């Protein structure tokens, strides 16, 4: 990846005989009209990659294809190319053709799918605007076919040749799904989600022997699960969610030695969950060989009890059974690998096993009113602000009181009662006094003892476990309001102020009475006596050692799904934001260091840059360091100005915020070719006094494991920023198009003054902010969605053109993925909107 720019034809014109050309991931523009290039170049080139640029216009206007005698690989994906797709009839040596993520229109060229002299083995035309039906595929060389996210319609192709990977998802295909029974034994991956397919799953015995992945979610399939589906020998992933399937579950699903992910949610399945293992002497299908990791059976009509032998699904990490009719008790020994659990909205009863105490209350409620929780933790009000020494003193004091009471109980019953009352009152006063002292003293030294405190991560909880999105949003300190490098939720103690501590104690004050359980991904860690690992600082002007960082007094100012954030003050007075990453969510140290170094090279006036990192000898000792920014988040300015004594943002300021955020995202997308990945109003800071925009928490998904990325995506969903296509993906990952969607949601927040996840209407089918704005826009009542503070400030008359133009941009950003504009276009559109001051 470089930053070369200019008209790409200026490179092709003088280029002579050459075999390999890779100009990808730059800023080249113009139209790639290869027909005007030198004939020796056209006849010799074998590999040509011009992807991830800003190319536009039509391909091969002057048709240079007859001269491309040796071209084998052509990649022009991720540009703004338009017009029809050439047939490439004369490019007989072409093996790989990638034109994804453009603006191409017209019909799908049949020649690319037919048996001919062409050697094409991979064809990717996804995320364009192609229309029409898909004909019969007769090519014997084509192996990978991706036509997803277009406007294709009609029935499924009757035959697919020798294709092994077929992705036709996110189109408008209709007709009977059972046509796939003619697809043959070459098929390995089938992705047909988000279409309008109906019919039943075929019960054929002679095909799909190589099938590894079957995804047909969000269609209109009906009928029962055919028994043959549980016998395909290589099947690893099944996603049939969001259909109309009914009947019983197949027991063979749960004992498969290959199946890893199973999603049957949002259907009409009934009956019980039946898990039948073979005897231990059968090495093929014994419990030891079961591979199931992800199981989602939520939103069905399942009944009966949870199988007691579910504990033998040793690899199970995700289990969602919510919104069914399950009864009975929860098994004692669910798998040790379980990280996400949701059994809410059922009729379970009995005692919740001790092994499940790490899961939050909302993993079991609402519903299940007869469940008993013997392992509930004490209220945070009683313990969150007491140090280790105070807890020990409290226990000793309680022991002495009990001993004294026992000694006098025999003969002085009334005196015993009086003593108990006296000591309880005295003890409560003493505890309150110690709490007040702890709040008023700034600790200048480090904690050198091993402090054990579980991470309590609110942001990482999935929607079914975190309550409403407002619960996660409204965690902000009232005193000092420091905003951090990344976390979108700020910690507070019972009085609302941050508690000073050392960077060596990664403990978080409990922030809400309603969270009685630890987050599933949280782990207890012991703090080191001092930082003895490797500290790397990118900024040469910042002289800092690991020992100095160890001694720096610090206070918790936030936490997120990535970890706990501290404000550390050096002896020089320089303030740093230090993010202590949660254990188990990041990649290995070598890969982590490489990615953080890349982050350190990203510089932009609207980004809070990473200044360095620290890696200790233990796995949980991973820190990211940046400069501390004393700024408020956009979320505070829009929704909580009364708490921070802030003036509401004017229309001019909101437009400027939108333009600066779009400009920064345009830089990340087009110059760095990476998404922000965690865009939301709490990760946009407004620096005083001019309220300059600063983006935080960018591209951190690159340092996360798959589980860590999943938590980040779940959090985005809880807060209203997750694009709808993520709900249909088993492994969603931040992308450029998901950034565009999140930015559209932020634009709606700027225009309406409402929270993205807020329930704003009782209209049927209209739930959240996005639904509400779309409904009003479709009813030509968009003026009713705008923030009243903007209307009132103009005496009831709004600058209609500015608000309407911003709303048009926002509505385009939240379109389906294939129809969303890129950030370059969004930035250009917003930049052309006149400021109110210029009117």
Image (cartoon, rainbow, N blue to C red):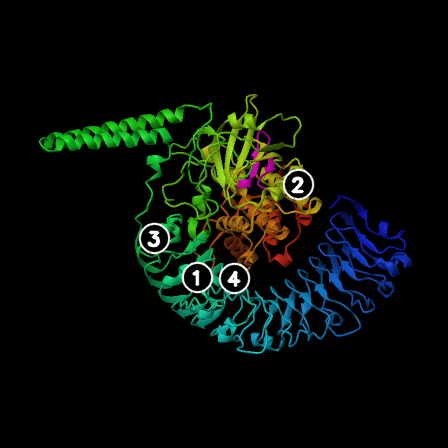
Q: Magenta includes 696?
A: yes
- Locate the C terminus and report the quarter of the image it occupies: top right
Label 4 crowding class (10 Å Cα cut-off): few <14, some 14-19, many 20+? many
Q: Is residue 715 above or below residue 399?
A: below
Q: Earlier in the sequence, mark 2 or mark 3?
A: 3
Residue drawn at the location 49% of the way across and 59% of the way down: 294
The Cα atoms of the two marked residues, 1 and 4, are separated by: 17 Å
Residue drawn at the location 60% of the way across and 75% of the way down: 180
**Label 2 sits on residue:** 598
Q: Earlier in the sequence, mark 3 or mark 4?
A: 4
**Label 3 sits on residue:** 353
Q: Quadrant of residue 269?
A: bottom left
Contact flag, marks 3 and 4 (Cβ < 8 Å): no
Q: As rendered, which of 800 and 208 lies closer to the eye?
A: 208
Residue 249, image x, y percentages: 44, 70
The kind of secondary structure element at disc 1 is: loop
Q: Earlier in the sequence, mark 4 or mark 2?
A: 4
The magenta segment:
682-698
Q: Quadrant of residue 649?
A: top right
Direction from residue 457 to residue 691 in the image, left or right: right
Instruction: Name the disc covering residue 298, or none.
Output: 1
Direction from residue 671 to residue 775 in the image, left or right: left
Q: As rendered, which of 168 and 553 lies closer to the eye?
A: 553
The Cα atoms of the two marked residues, 2 and 1, are separated by: 40 Å
Eye-nearest disc, 2 or 1: 2
Q: Earlier in the sequence, mark 3 or mark 1?
A: 1
The Cα atoms of the two marked residues, 2 and 3, are separated by: 45 Å
Q: Earlier in the sequence, mark 2 or mark 1?
A: 1
The kind of secondary structure element at disc 3 is: loop
**Label 4 sits on residue:** 260
The Cα atoms of the two marked residues, 4 and 2, are separated by: 33 Å
């Amino acid at each position: 990846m470089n930053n070369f720019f200019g008209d790409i034809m200026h490179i092709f014109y003088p280029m002579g005989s050459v075999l390999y050309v890779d100009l990808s991931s730059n800023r080249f523009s113009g139209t790639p009209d290869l027909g005007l290039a030198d004939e020796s170049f056209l006849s010799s080139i074998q590999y040509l990659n011009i992807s991830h640029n800003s190319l536009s216009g039509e391909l091969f206007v002057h048709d240079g294809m007859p001269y491309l005698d040796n071209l084998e690989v052509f990649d022009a994906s991720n540009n703004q190319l338009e017009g029809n797709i050439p047939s490439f009839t004369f490019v007989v040596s072409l093996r790989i053709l990638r034109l994804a993520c453009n603006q191409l229109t017209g019909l799908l060229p049949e020649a690319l799918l037919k048996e001919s002299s062409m050697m094409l083995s991979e064809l990717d035309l996804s995320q364009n605007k192609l229309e029409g039906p898909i004909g019969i595929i007769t090519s014997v060389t084509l192996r990978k076919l991706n036509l997803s996210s277009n406007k294709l319609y009609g029935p499924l192709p009757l035959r697919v040749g020798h294709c092994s990977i077929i992705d036709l998802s996110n189109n408008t295909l209709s007709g009977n799904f059972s046509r796939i029974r003619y697809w043959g034994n070459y098929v390995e991956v089938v992705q047909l989600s988000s279409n309008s397919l109906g019919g039943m799953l075929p019960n054929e015995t002679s095909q799909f022997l190589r099938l590894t992945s079957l995804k047909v979610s969000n269609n209109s399939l009906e009928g029962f699960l055919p028994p043959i589906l549980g016998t395909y020998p290589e099947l690893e992933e099944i996603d049939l969610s969001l259909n109309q399937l009914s009947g019983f579950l197949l027991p063979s699903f749960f004992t498969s030695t290959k199946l890893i992910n199973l999603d049957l949610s949002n259907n009409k399945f009934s009956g019980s969950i039946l898990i039948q293992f073979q005897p231990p002497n059968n090495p093929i299908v014994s419990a030891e060989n079961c591979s199931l990791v992800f199981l989602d059976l939520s939103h069905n009509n399942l009944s009966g009890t949870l199988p007691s032998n579910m504990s033998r699904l040793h690899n199970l990490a995700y289990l969602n059974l919510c919104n069914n009719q399950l009864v009975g008790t929860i098994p004692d020994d669910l798998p040790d690998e379980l990280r996400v659990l949701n059994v809410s909205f059922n009729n379970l009863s009995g005692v919740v096993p001790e092994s499940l105490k790490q899961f939050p209350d909302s993993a079991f409620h609402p519903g299940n009113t007869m469940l008993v929780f013997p392992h509930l933790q004490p209220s945070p009000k009683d313990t969150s602000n007491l140090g280790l020494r105070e807890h020990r003193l409290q226990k000793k004091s309680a022991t002495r009181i009990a001993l004294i009471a026992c000694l006098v109980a025999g003969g002085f019953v009334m005196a015993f009662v009086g003593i108990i009352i006296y000591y309880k009152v005295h003890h409560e006063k003493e505890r309150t006094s110690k709490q007040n002292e702890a709040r008023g003293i700034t600790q200048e030294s480090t904690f050198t003892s091993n402090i054990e405190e579980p991470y309590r991560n609110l942001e990482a909880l999935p929607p079914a476990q975190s309550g409403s999105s407002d619960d996660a949003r409204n965690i902000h300190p009232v005193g000092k309001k420091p905003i951090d490098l990344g976390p979108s939720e700020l910690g507070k103690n019972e009085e609302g102020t941050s508690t000073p501590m050392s960077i060596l104690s990664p403990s978080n004050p409990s922030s809400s009475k309603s969270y009685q359980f630890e987050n599933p991904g949280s782990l207890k860690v012991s703090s080191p006596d001092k930082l003895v690992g490797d500290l790397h600082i990118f900024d040469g002007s910042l002289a800092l050692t690991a020992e100095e960082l160890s001694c720096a007094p610090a206070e918790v100012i936030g936490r997120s799904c990535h970890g706990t954030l501290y404000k550390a003050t050096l002896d020089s007075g320089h303030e740093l934001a230090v993010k202590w990453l949660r254990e188990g969510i990041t990649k290995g140290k070598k890969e982590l260091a490489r990615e953080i170094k890349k982050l350190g090279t990203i510089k932009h006036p609207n980004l809070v840059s990473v200044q360095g990192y620290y890696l200790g000898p233990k796995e949980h000792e991973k820190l990211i360091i940046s400069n501390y920014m004393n700024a408020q988040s956009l979320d505070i300015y829009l929704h909580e100005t009364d708490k921070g004594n802030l003036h509401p943002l004017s229309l001019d300021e909101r437009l400027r915020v939108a333009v600066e955020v779009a400009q920064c995202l345009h830089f990340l997308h087009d110059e760095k070719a990476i998404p922000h990945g965690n865009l939301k109003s709490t990760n946009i800071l407004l620096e005083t006094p001019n309220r300059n925009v600063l983006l935080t928490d960018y591209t951190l998904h690159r340092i996360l494991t798959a589980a860590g990325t999943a938590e980040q995506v779940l959090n985005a969903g809880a807060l209203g920023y997750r694009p709808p296509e993520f709900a249909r993906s088993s492994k969603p990952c931040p992308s450029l198009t998901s950034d565009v969607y999140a930015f559209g949601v932020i634009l709606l927040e700027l225009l309406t003054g409402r929270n993205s996840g807020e329930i704003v209407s009782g209209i049927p089918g209209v739930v959240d902010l996005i639904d509400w704005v779309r409904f009003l826009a479709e009813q030509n009542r968009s003026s009713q969605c705008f923030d009243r503070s903007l209307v009132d400030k103009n005496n009831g008359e709004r600058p209609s053109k500015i608000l309407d133009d911003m709303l048009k941009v926002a509505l385009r950003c939240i379109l389906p993925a294939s129809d969303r504009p890129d950030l370059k276009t969004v930035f250009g559109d917003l930049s052309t909107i006149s400021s109110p001051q210029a009117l």
